[in-house]
Amino acid sequence: MAATATAIPELVPTARAEAAGLTDAMHTGLGYDSIAVADGVAGPELAIAAGRSAIARSGLPAQEYDLLIHSSLWFQGLDMWGTASFVANETVGARAVSMDLQQRSCGGMAALHMATACMQSGYFDNALITTGDNFAAPAFDRWNSQMYTLFGDGGTALALSTRDGFARVLATAAFADNSLEGFGRGSEKFRFAPGTEQPIPVLRRLAQHVQTPAAADGWERIEAAMLKTRDLALSDAGVDQSQITRAVLPFIYRGGDQRENWDVLGFTREQTAWEYGRTVGHLGAGDQFAGLDHIAPGLSVGDHVLVFGVGVGFNFVAAVLEVVAPPRW
């Protein structure tokens, strides 16, 4: 891993949003201090800003990147177009293979899993992974659209190289339980055009699904899949959990003495990047890359980091990193 980078817009204090009546009772007091809100900047533009920064930090010329994978959670500014090609052309140039990879909030981590596999097989030497989202109203209500979550705008990027970097990817692991997909679909009828209902009724779909037998033990099944994914990654890396210095997890907070993701996975709050995540919000597919970018300057050679993603569907991806050199930036 050669470099990380983020492009984070203005931070809006949650207290201001709550005072303005933007958050309902379920989404008030979730532990976020502020949320990143972009004004008139589309998700792909945020991804490009982060991507250019990651390339500069990596020390590798842009033309040496032969793969770009872009992930997002939400609308990318236009219907029916090649977002990844746009991001690639504006960062690594015309010749890099470019792909969009979608798996909701796990999209960035899925891209890391796929990119490292391609690089290990010898197809590519250098790759750039980007994410970018703007959760703008009225189509999306960033303040009230998902349980335990306020959505922040931002772009993130990882520069990967087989030749050089500050961290070695020891292993990645992916796992899934597709029987959980109903939590994102509910009993809604399929539409045949986007934007037929605004804002997107994510919580209504969830409420519909929890009334069905298919939802039984849903949270327990999610937790079991998280543990399975963690164990697969640690085993493949040959690393014991006690050797993990930091864990970068989704920027989601349940509160109310409920089990947080770090509790489920066996880490402390202090080991995670939540203190940063609570200032920017849930960045769609980019939480993990933003969190890694935040903690990277404080890592020491020999440290091990677990980076973990969860995406509605449900898919899970984990990566184990070993710090081999101080970051250049």
Image (tube, rainbow, N blue to C red):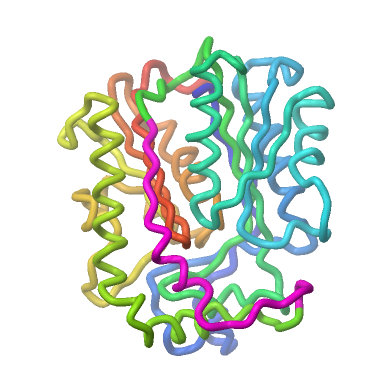
Give the magenta range: 172-195
Is residue 47 shown left or right of residue 90? left
Taking the spot 75% from the left edge, 81% from the top edge, the residue there is 196
- Residue 269's image quarter? bottom left
Q: Residue at x 70, y 82 (%)?
A: 198
Residue toward you, 203 or 130: 203
Picture layout, residue 160 above or below residue 105: above
Q: Position of residue 221 (x, y in %)?
A: 27, 63
Residue at image point 69% right, 20% down = 65
What x and y, as percent, mark residue 248?
A: 37, 45
Specify whether residue 47 is painted magenta. Answer: no
User: In the rendered image of this protein, does residue 167 appear above or below residue 9?
Assistant: above
Left or right: residue 318 versus residue 16 is: left
Of 28 and 238, nearer the camera is: 238
**Of 73 and 177, the residue lying toward us:** 177
What residue occupies the far top of the structure in this picture? 163
With 321 as the anchor, is 113 left or right in this view? right
**Residue 254 location, quadrant:** bottom left
Q: Does 239 sit left or right of 15 as displayed?
A: left
Quadrant where the image shows the C terminus: top right
